[in-house]
Amino acid sequence: MTALRREAVQAWLLVLPACVMLAGFTHIPAVATLIESLYTTPRGARPARFIGLDQYRALLDDPVFFQALGNNALYAAATIPASVVLALLMALAVDSRLPGRAALRLAYFTPTMLPMIAVANIWLFFYTPDYGLLDQLGGMVGLGRHNWLGDPTLALWSLIAVAVWKEAGFFMIFYLAALQAIPPHLREAAALEGAGRMTVLRRVVLPLLMPTTLFVVVNAVINAFRLVDHVVVMTRGGPDNSTTLLLYYIYETGFRFWDTGMAAALTTVLLLILSALAALQFGVLGRRVHYR
């Protein structure tokens, strides 16, 4: 065996565990879900029956599916830019030489360390009408009572606020690490050329943060389409399906109504949406990424 072939074999052996994990937990389940979506749900002695694309045709006549899709689109459009921009602002704040910045970093990151269920229960207390923290504070300044989770016009925005509060601190860590990795002489050279702070931020810092921004945005998109814990604890999709998101609808279809065929079809649609968004992100943001 030549040295070149030996190196190739060693390289494949090194990546083999990762390939096995990726295939076993990602690709094979995705293909199995696609196949299952083409069959009816087996019930008792009745086996699954091949029905082709009938599940997908049924989705086109399902108003709850389109409402969940619209809710998820609004949820993603609100949480992704808000959490990413807030994370960047927090990272810029704690990267500067502020007094007590260690405590500030801990305060920003604390929501991320809390379990999802614990966060949902904390915010349930905040949103409780009359007795909750928000209504108590609002009453001090003369604001009226609000049923935050019981009003269809407020319920989804209440979930969005919880998501931004929890995710921004997590994304801040990546931005902070990227900021601290920027060589100081780049900022010093810009300052010597007479560039102001905003010019340095726009011309030096932000372009160098683009690899981190791409990573953060990809994770923010995934998080926007995989939320189910907060919905289960806080609203159960209500009121009137105003907080039903795609993954929660999949959960209800598969485990509450035990229609695994339709749940598989919904999951396939969700995978297609995420694949399209990932291609768009890498196509648009990938061109703006500058690696040193």
Image (cartoon, grey):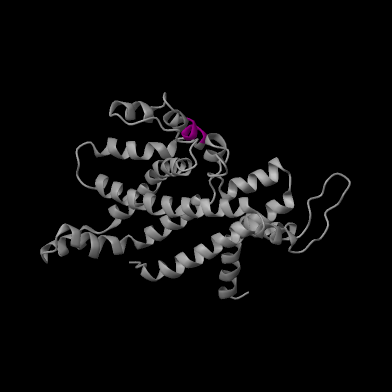
Question: Residue extending furthest right?
Answer: 45
Q: Can residue 23 be seen in this view?
A: no
Front-lying residue, 14 or 222: 222
Snapshot quadrant of residue 15: bottom right
Where 207 falls versus 110 (above or below)? below
Question: Residue extending furthest top?
Answer: 131
Q: Which residue is drawn at 69% across and 46% down?
A: 254
> Majority secondary structure of the magenta segment?
helix
What's the magenta region?
Answer: 117-121
Residue 120 lies in magenta, yes or no? yes
Image quadrant holding the N terminus, namely: bottom right
Front-lying residue, 15 or 59: 59
Image quadrant holding the C terminus, namely: bottom left
Residue 170 at what x, y percent from top left? 40, 45
Where 65 falls versus 251 (above or below)? below
Residue 275 at what x, y percent from top left? 55, 63
- Is 205 situated left or right of 193 in this image? right
Residue 250 at what x, y percent from top left? 64, 48
Residue 28 lies in magenta, yes or no? no
Residue 241 at what x, y percent from top left? 57, 44
Q: Which residue is drawn at 58% across and 70% down?
A: 8
Q: Is residue 153 visible?
A: yes
- Is 225 situated left or right of 46 in this image? left
Q: Residue at x 73, y 44 (%)?
A: 258
Snapshot quadrant of residue 36: bottom right
Snapshot quadrant of residue 136: top left
- Is 85 situated left or right of 155 in this image? left
